[in-house]
Image: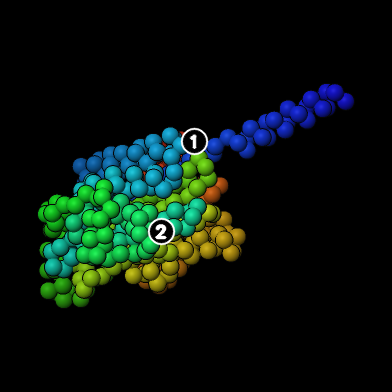
Amino acid sequence: MIVRLLLWMMLMTAATADAARPAKPVLLIHGGAGVIRSTLTPQVEQAVRADLARALDAGYAVLEAGGSALDAVARAVVVLEDSPHFNAGKGAVFTHEGRNELDASIMDGATRRAGAVAGVRHVRNPVLLARAVMDKSPHVLLIGEGAEAFGRTVGGIDFVEPAYFHTDERWRQLQEALQKEAAGQSSSLGRAIHYGTVGAVALDSHGRLAAATSTGGMTNKRWGRVGDSPIIGAGTYADARCAVSATGWGEFFIRATVARDICARVEYGRQPLLKAARAVVMDTIPALGGDGGVIAVDADGNFTLPFNTDGMYRGWVGRDGKAHVAILADED
Ligand code: ASP
């Protein structure tokens, strides 16, 4: 009898300790989906892999220190925005008029608070302005000059001259797009070779989820075009069960409300995250005529990075705490 009682007490203590022990965090990042194999030079590949690894390190350090998923995704996205190799912040693509107009969003799964900005031209890290919209304004989405005026009132936002965003490679891509357009090869914005938007999703050790996405949009965009990245529910979404950040042909991601659809399948349909994300990326988007990919994590730490293109710049740290970086489809 005494032995059984002792055994029971030991089991209960172990169970309580298990429940109290913080979960191992999870972090996923992406740097855009697209056709990669034919265009990637060894130099660019090396630089992209190094920057993805740096972004993972920066975000995961926040999580390892017990920080929030929200801080971790913002931190990882800032590193990718500051790199010239991704279509966000420093490496943003050019509009038809030769300008850079940046979009970003962030969402906190625990509270379902969200913030977003679109069409900003002087903000070094649009994801931080999106965070400020969430934290310091009563709004969710601010655009253009108004968003920047708000940013100047809150402090802590780094403003830069438009020339900061210029990179020769993105300028060359615009010239190529303009030439094709003039030759009648494509009338306007269409499928991109490589999208290059950046994003992050995380599960922290307290079980909270968050997602963030940042982009320059699509080369040769005009008329104030805004894609899915700053649209909560399309390019970014997080709730208590599920967090998603997307990359791809934004018009289709908006029409399919991609990020929310994945989380709704988990919530209403009780679908496993992997199945939900796969259905939307592999069936819904291609059926509409679009392409791209997502990163997604759920509250149990299950995660997935599906894409329907040749590759997707991506990285993840799962519950084993090991960092992985991959580019092509066959690398997992
Ligand atoms: N989804 C982005 C947009 O349409 C593009 C990208 O993923 O790079 O603006």
One can see residue 121 in this view: yes
Q: Which element type, helix, strand or loop, lies under badge 2?
A: strand
Q: CA distance from mark 1 to mark 2?
A: 29 Å
Image-based side of 66 in relation to 134, left or right: right
Horizontal side, residue 331 vs residue 276: left or right:
left
Q: Could you tell me which residue is drawn at 21 percent across and 73 percent down?
A: 223
Type of amino acid under label 2: Ala
Q: In this rendering, is residue 186 above or below 229?
A: below
* Residue 318 percent location from the top left of the image: 47, 41
The residue depicted at 79 percent of the width and 25 percent of the height is 6
Label 1 SS: loop
Q: Which residue is mark 2?
A: 114
Would you name the residue on which mark 1 appears?
320
- Ligand 1 within 8 A of label 1's CB? no
Instruction: Kindly identify the amino acid type of the residue bearing the numbered disc 1.
Output: Asp
For the residue carrying disc 1, how many other residues have a C-alpha within 10 Å: few (<14), some (14-19), or many (20+)?
few
Give the side of residue 230 with respect to residue 65, left or right.
Answer: left
Mark 1 / mark 2, whichever is N-terminal: 2
Mark 2 C-beta closer than 8 Å to ligand 1: no
Label 2 packing within 10 angstroms: few (<14), some (14-19), many (20+): many
Q: Quadrant of the N terminus?
A: top right
As rendered, which of 120 and 132 lies closer to the eye?
132
Q: Position of residue 97 (x, y in %)?
A: 13, 68
Residue 314: tell me if it is visible: no
Name the image colouring: rainbow
